[in-house]
Image (spheres, rainbow, N blue to C red):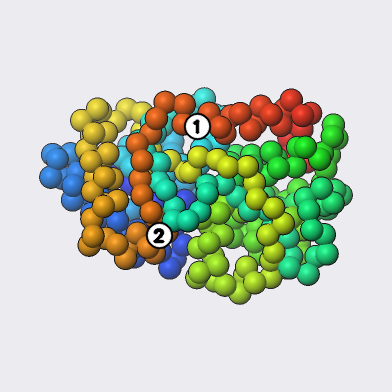
Amino acid sequence: MTGRIASLGMYDHPAQHAANDRLWSAIAAVLRERGVAEVPDRLDRTRDVHAIWRDPALLFGQACGYPLIADPTLDLRVIAFPIYAGRESGSVIVARADDPRGSVAVFRGSRAAINDRQSNTGMNLFRATVAPFAGQGPFFAEVVETGAHRASIVAVGTGKADLAAIDRVTYATIARFEPALVARLKIVAPSPASPSLPFVTATGTDAETVAALRSALDHVAADPALAAVRETLLLAGIVPAEPGALTPISTLEADAVRAGYPTLR
């Protein structure tokens, strides 16, 4: 055991555990070659990602972009952004396949499902999609918080909710590994585009370790031996973090506020 931790809990469907383990093993090997101390052998799957993000021992993880712009107490440094194969970053707005309604505007008064009020893809992008139609008051009769995108998919599919915004990568993953769940759904609309979920480290991570992390990410993004791993994870590439990369997320929030719809309701 070491004091440092690593997590890839944002996109870690059980069918992807082995691929994420191999990805981390390859990252860890590069870090050790670069002289980084206390590199954990395994990914931490024992704790909620929100707790992991707040752990000053976080060496490597993946975070939702919305808390990074909305919560000033979240002390993380963005390292890089993944690119997912053939998928614009953002969400799909889904309803039951047999629901006759065909556009977001006509779902006024329905029930919405969200995974988390602090989720970019599940809430912020949903709010941005609904804001042009909402006016000054509530758009939905009820908003149910499910705790996970998969749970929101189940809620819509089983009739406990009528509409939800599902992260595109999660939706594609569920479609691959649990196709019966998405067979109950239809895509009503895309959300606005958004940055992907960034790879992060604790703000206190030293500059040499950050450089080693970036080198390790470059390696795993290009290593032919990891092609099958990347395919399982839908991972097409990794790009460096640029200043202001998360600005589109805060812009979408500001646009919703200006439209008179500061809260998804």
The residue lying at 15 percent from left, 45 percent from top is: 32
Residue with the mark numbered 1: 246
Q: Position of residue 249 (x, y in %)?
A: 57, 34
Q: Position of residue 54 (x, y in %)?
A: 44, 36
Q: Which three-letter amino acid code belongs to the residue tagged 2? A: Leu
Above/below status of 146 relative to 69? below
Q: Which three-letter amino acid code belongs to the residue tagged 1? A: Leu
The residue lying at 69 percent from left, 53 percent from top is: 189
Q: Position of residue 75 (x, y in %)?
A: 43, 29
Quarter of the C terminus within the rendering: top right
Q: Earlier in the sequence, mark 1 or mark 2?
A: 2
Q: Residues within 10 Å of mark 2 (few under 14, many from 20)?
A: many
Residue with the mark numbered 2: 233
Q: Quadrant of residue 34?
A: top left
Q: Residues within 10 Å of mark 1 (few under 14, many from 20)?
A: many
Name the foreground residue: 161 vs 230: 230
Q: Quadrant of residue 180?
A: bottom right
Indicate left or right for 132 with 247 as reference: right
